[in-house]
Image (cartoon, rainbow, N blue to C red):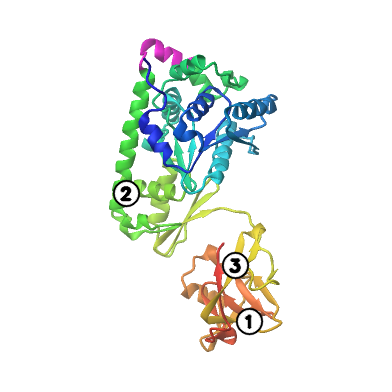
Amino acid sequence: MTRPLLSPEWVARLKQFKKLIVGFSGGLDSTVLLHVLASTPPLSNQLLAVHINHGISGNSLNWQRHCEQLCLDLGIAFIAKAIEFDRSANVEEAARNARYDFFSSLLEDNDCLVLGHHLDDQAETVLLQLFRGAGVDGLAAMQECSNLGAGQLARPFLTCPRVELEHYARIHELKWIEDESNQDTKYSRNYLRHRVMPLLLEKWPGVAGNISRAATHCQQAKANLEVLAIKDCPDLLNATDHLLIEPIKGLEFERITNVLKFWLKKNRIQLPSSKTFHRIIHEIIFAKLDAIPTVSWNQIQVRRFQQHLYLLKADQINLPKAIKWQQFPASLIYPDANIELSAVKAQKGLMIPKEAQIEIRFRKGGEEIYWHGQTKHLKKLFQEWQIPPWVRDRVPLVYINDQLACVVGYAVSDVFFTTNSLEAWSIVNNS
């Protein structure tokens, strides 16, 4: 008697979720997964099958129809999504990132994305990471359970070899899609699957399970390194896009790198090369106090200002000269420049005269504000407030009737300041 593909422990684990979103390509793995879940009474009412149409193959539409029909037969809710992604570089990686971005957008609190990755997939992933020279994080490969967006991600078949899924499919007479690109060995995973793994299995029949077990060991090592990072730098627990430098300067190089990796992962940033970590440590962390160095990779920048590291995503947003806030106090949303401001009633703060013309502008140089009984240059105030130089040009400035009335998040001009709670507003930057 063969073991069930979905153990009682997995049934209990998945039953706790409100919705189970199944990534359904129509291939063997996801077809078996969907059938198993639909045949498990405690779970069948929680299912939503999601098919991603990459638009790469001429058969894409037929595959989508096949998936929709199978869900109709099983009585499972179904949605399909055509996605766009960059096809100029690594198509496999770009498609994968686009898939996960969409899956993540669907997940709400107490939802779970369920995928059909199996033991052979895990072994291939470990080897691909090894060939790329990955560290512990990469060699940890895929986890059975992890966080994704507002929900979680589960891979209940990760310890099941592909042959068990094939056996289940034959017994239940399931039909699945064979993507012709899966035979194309120009793709790294396919080359490994069709050319390399058969040779390894011929010599070591249990090699896939052994490689997968090594990934489990690396997952434990990864968890231990994360504990060490927090011990070395307790600020990591609350750190967002900036990190205090002083606590880590006295650490050994490898432990500084470990802290930086934790910080970047917490901010959902893909880790750079070892060479880039060397540059961050030598050129930024140990730079002169008055230096403002930068290290960049992909679309990411790490900078230093005084005693903090700052993490920035490089963007090409051109800020508008002015945005009229015509519907005040309704929120001002300007997506093209990633601007979102809201007005909140306050005990004291900004007073808006009747019939006022309200505009949002950004620093160009030479701005002055009447504050604390004096006319002050905005440039000097930004320095006093220790605002990093690259942030200063993005701080929203509220102009009322062509006069600078408020530096959002920092100051309100004496001319427009009131302690009358019936008239006072606080401008909040939600960008």
Q: Residue at x 45, y 16 (%)?
A: 163
Q: Name the residue carrying label 2.
A: 229
Q: Residues within 10 Å of mark 3 (few under 14, many from 20)?
A: many
Location of residue 268 in the rendering, given as x and y in whole percent from the top left corner: 47, 47
Which quadrant of the figure has residue 401? Answer: bottom right
Q: Main secondary structure of the magenta part?
A: helix
Q: Please name the residue that numbered disc 3 is placed on.
A: 341
Amino acid at dot 3: Leu
Mark 3 element type: strand
The verdict on residue 404 being magenta is no
Left or right of residue 220: residue 130: right
Instruction: Give the left or right position of residue 108, taking residue 220 as reference.
Output: right
> Which residue does the image show at 36% across and 13% down from the upper left?
204
Gap in Å between the C-alphas at discs 2 and 3?
36 Å
In this rendered view, identify the residue nearer to me: 75 or 86.
Answer: 75
Residue that appears at 29% across and 42% down: 224
Q: Is residue 164 above or below residue 283?
A: above
Span highlighted in magenta in the image: 195-206
Q: Residues within 10 Å of mark 1 (few under 14, many from 20)?
A: some
Give the structural element (helix, strand or loop) at label 1: loop
- Percent x, y for residue 393? 58, 66
Work out whether mark 2 precedes mark 1 in sequence or the reverse, and give the earlier one. 2
Residue 203 magenta-highlighted: yes
| Mark found first going from the N terminus, 1 or 3 | 3
Q: Which residue is mark 1?
A: 352
Residue 316: x, y in percent? 63, 54
| Residue farthest toward the top in the current orientation of the protein | 202
Between discs 2 and 3, the one toward the N terminus: 2
Q: CA distance from mark 1 to mark 3?
A: 15 Å
